[in-house]
């Protein structure tokens, strides 16, 4: 019975990951809300680290908090599920925390680099090194959240086993 539950969970997580990735692709390339349907006639990029983050921080200091929330917090939050779900899938390999964090970093970095490059080449959006920094940070935070939840679950499971025995 436990194997059936584990198999169902595995399939559910796989479906959720696919739905999440489809959402990301739509959001990053086709969303009207963030101007993704506008194709520019020139390449747009920002390759100096922290330029845009500083700009949004300065707007926050001036009292205009919405651009900071949408662009800085949004870029982090958008990729937290990636790190969390990647942690679940990577956990099957029985890697340690450091290797799992490194695997998450590499996977997130490569995926986001591909996305940013596609945005540049298709002239939809902007290739922004700050987006890479924020998205990878979000993925790493998602992975850390997964590890914390995992530790809490395993801690509860051990204490419950002791009470039963």
Image: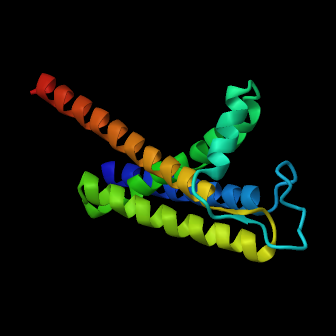
Task: Work out whether 161 lies above or below 72.
Answer: above
Indicate left or right for 6 with 97 as reference.
right
Q: Of residues 149 and 28, which is closer to you in this image? A: 28
Q: Residue at x 56, y 53 (%)?
A: 135
Closer to the camera in the image, 2 or 24? 24
The residue positioned 33% from the left and 54% from the top of the image is: 3
Q: Residue 150: x, y in percent?
A: 32, 41
Q: Is residue 31 left or right of residue 4?
A: right
Q: Is any atom of residue 82 visible in this view? A: yes
Which of these two is toward me, 79 or 38?
38
Residue 54 sits in which quadrant? top right
Does residue 148 lie above or below 25 as drawn?
A: above
Q: Residue furthest bottom?
A: 121
Q: Where residue 145 sits: x, y (%)?
A: 41, 40
Q: Residue 20 vs residue 104: left or right? A: right
Q: How was the colour assigned to the protein in this rendering?
A: rainbow
Q: Residue furthest left?
A: 165
Please state if 24 lies on the left or on the right of 122 as rendered.
left
Q: Whole-percent x and y of residue 76?
A: 57, 45
Residue sitting at 60 percent across and 54 percent down? 130
The answer to whether residue 1 of the structure is visible from this angle is no
Residue 159's x, y, as percent? 18, 27
Picture quarter containing residue 154?
top left
């Amino acid at each position: 019975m436990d194997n059936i539950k584990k198999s169902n969970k595995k399939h559910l997580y796989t479906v959720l990951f696919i739905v999440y990735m489809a959402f990301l692709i739509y959001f990053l390339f086709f969303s009207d809300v963030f101007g993704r349907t506008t194709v520019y006639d020139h390449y747009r990029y920002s390759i100096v680290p922290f330029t845009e983050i500083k700009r949004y921080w300065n707007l926050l200091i001036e009292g205009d908090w919405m651009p900071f929330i949408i662009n800085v917090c949004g870029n982090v939050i958008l990729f937290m599920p990636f790190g969390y779900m990647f942690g679940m899938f990577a956990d099957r390999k029985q890697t340690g925390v450091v290797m799992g964090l490194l695997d998450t970093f590499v996977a997130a970095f490569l995926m986001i680099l591909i996305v940013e490059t596609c945005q540049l080449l298709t002239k939809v959006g902007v290739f922004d090194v700050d987006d890479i920094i924020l998205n990878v940070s979000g993925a790493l935070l998602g992975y850390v959240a997964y590890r914390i939840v995992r530790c809490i679950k395993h801690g509860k499971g051990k204490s419950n086993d002791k009470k039963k025995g």
